Amino acid sequence: MIRNSISYSIWLLPPPELFDSLQIMIKRLCKKYNSPLFIPHITLISGFLGDPKEILKKFKKTQLPMSEISVEFDSIITTNEFFKSVFFQITLSDSFIKARTFLNPIFTCNEKCYQPHLSMIYGRFTKIEKKNIINEIGSVPINFKVNEFFLAYNNEIDLYWNLIWSKKINE
């Protein structure tokens, strides 16, 4: 599948305490390894296109059929993909699958291979660098539940991401 370099996505963010500690680690890694900076997030639906006003209108109307989404971390993984260089793999909980299945047709996400994750750094690194990054990260975070989801604008050409709107899951 070809990624849309300019697109929209729906994200989940860790709770404030975990968000802050992950953001500190991401900033440190990005500075040390000269990587683009981003906020810690888990992409629920990605790479969809459309008129920005229509997307926002759909997002504001969307009501998920649950009160929260469970995020369960598995392990630290590495790949050779720029945006999935070193990341925490996420286990597909029932609520996660239900949310994704519900949102997929609304936002026309055509991802064929979905691997939920929380990236810690973007870039192309050697095996030794990845091993060092994993050692710097240390342990896998605790599992958590979220009751809010976010609409994000993605500009992967200029390596810029912007949160546009947030919404409580049960609103």
Image (tube, rainbow, N blue to C red):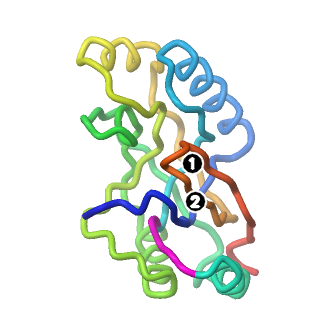
**Which span is picked out in magenta?**
46-50
Disc 2 crowd rating (10 Å Cα; few below 14, some 14-19, many 20+) is: many
Q: Residue at x 23, y 18 (%)?
A: 127
Q: Secondary structure at mark 2?
A: strand
Disc 1 crowd rating (10 Å Cα; few below 14, some 14-19, many 20+) is: some
Q: Where residue 3 sits in the image (x, y, percent)?
A: 35, 60
Magenta stretch, main secondary structure, is: strand
- Seen in the image, is 103 located left or right of residue 40? left
Residue beneath disc 1: 41
Q: Secondary structure at mark 1?
A: loop
Quick one: quadrant of the C terminus? bottom right
What's under tag 2, amino acid-wise? Trp
Q: Residue at x 33, y 28 (%)?
A: 124
- Seen in the image, is 152 located left or right of residue 9? right
Residue beneath disc 2: 11
| Mark carried by residue 113 | none
Q: Residue at x 53, y 19 (%)?
A: 29
Q: Where residue 114 sits in the image (x, y, percent)?
A: 31, 62
